[in-house]
Image (cartoon, rainbow, N blue to C red):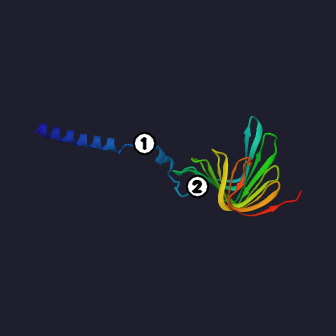
Amino acid sequence: MKTNVTYKILNIVTVFTVAMFFSCNDSFNQVQKLGISENEPIGVDYNLNLKYTDSGRVTANLISTKTLDYSNRDFPFNEFVDGVQLDVFDEANKKSTVVADYAIIYTETDLIDMQGNVVITTHDNRVLKTDQLYFDQKNEWLYTNEHVTFKSEQDLIDGNGFDSNMKFTNAEVLEVTGIITLEE
């Protein structure tokens, strides 16, 4: 009889041990997410004025009145919901400006999607206007399939689509619908 009771106790202990073993997991990530809805931003920045520097020289200045940080998502991103302005400075400290009503930066892909009254003004007075523009940060490439107006040194070009490197040295309006030659 004593063997039977010992056998039952041993089985109960074994069941509890196995249950505890399989119920334990690394829940650190779950604890971090407590109280944070996956649909809500993990942070909100107001009146953001962020300066990027390289070797002590300011290379860019990002200004936004409201930024939402969704780095808590599986596909993290930052949203600039009330507009954004980015001033970029070249090696000679000449400024080019990018303005948009809304922008979203996808962290993992380094893609920036700018929307609503997007205007890029380069330091040499070239101007690109469109409703949506993408910037691939890895390849330093700008592109869109939306309607664009591009003012170069000598022409004002309307079209549907745009491709260019970041420095506009090979800017191309796709599906040109009109060209006006500007007088000097």
Q: Position of residue 17 (x, y in %)?
A: 29, 40
Query: How far apart are the two marked residues, 2 and 1, measured between alpha carbons?
Result: 24 Å
| Of the pair 109 and 73, the residue shown nearer to us | 109
Where residue 27 sits, quadrant-wise, is: top left
Q: Position of residue 164 (x, y in %)?
A: 69, 51
Kindly give the residue lying farthest to the top in the view shown: 55
Q: Which residue is mark 1?
A: 26
Give the residue displayed 82% in from the left and 50% down from the top: 124
What secondary structure is marked by label 2? loop
Local packing at callout 1 (Cα closer than 10 Å; few below 14, some 14-19, many 20+) is: few
| Of the pair 177 and 65, the residue shown nearer to us | 177
Q: Which mark is residue 150?
A: none
**Residue 104 versus residue 88 in the image, above or below:** below
The amino acid on which the numbered mark 2 sits, given as a three-letter code, is Pro
Where residue 114 sits, quadrant-wise, is: bottom right
Give the residue displayed 67% in from the left and 46% down from the top: 140
Kindly give the residue lying farthest to the right in the view shown: 184
Q: Position of residue 168 (x, y in %)?
A: 74, 49
**Residue 161 versus residue 164 in the image, above or below:** below
Local packing at callout 2 (Cα closer than 10 Å; few below 14, some 14-19, many 20+) is: some
The amino acid on which the numbered mark 1 sits, given as a three-letter code, is Asp
Q: Which residue is mark 2?
A: 41
Residue 116 seen anywhere in this rendered image of the structure: no
Give the residue displayed 79% in from the left and 51% down from the top: 122
- Left or right, 151 with reference to 40: right
Give the residue displayed 53% in from the left and 52% down from the top: 73
What secondary structure is marked by label 1? loop
Q: Earlier in the sequence, mark 2 or mark 1?
A: 1
Give the quarter of the figure containing the C terminus: bottom right
**Residue 150 versus residue 11 in the image, above or below:** below
Give the quarter of the figure containing the N terminus: top left
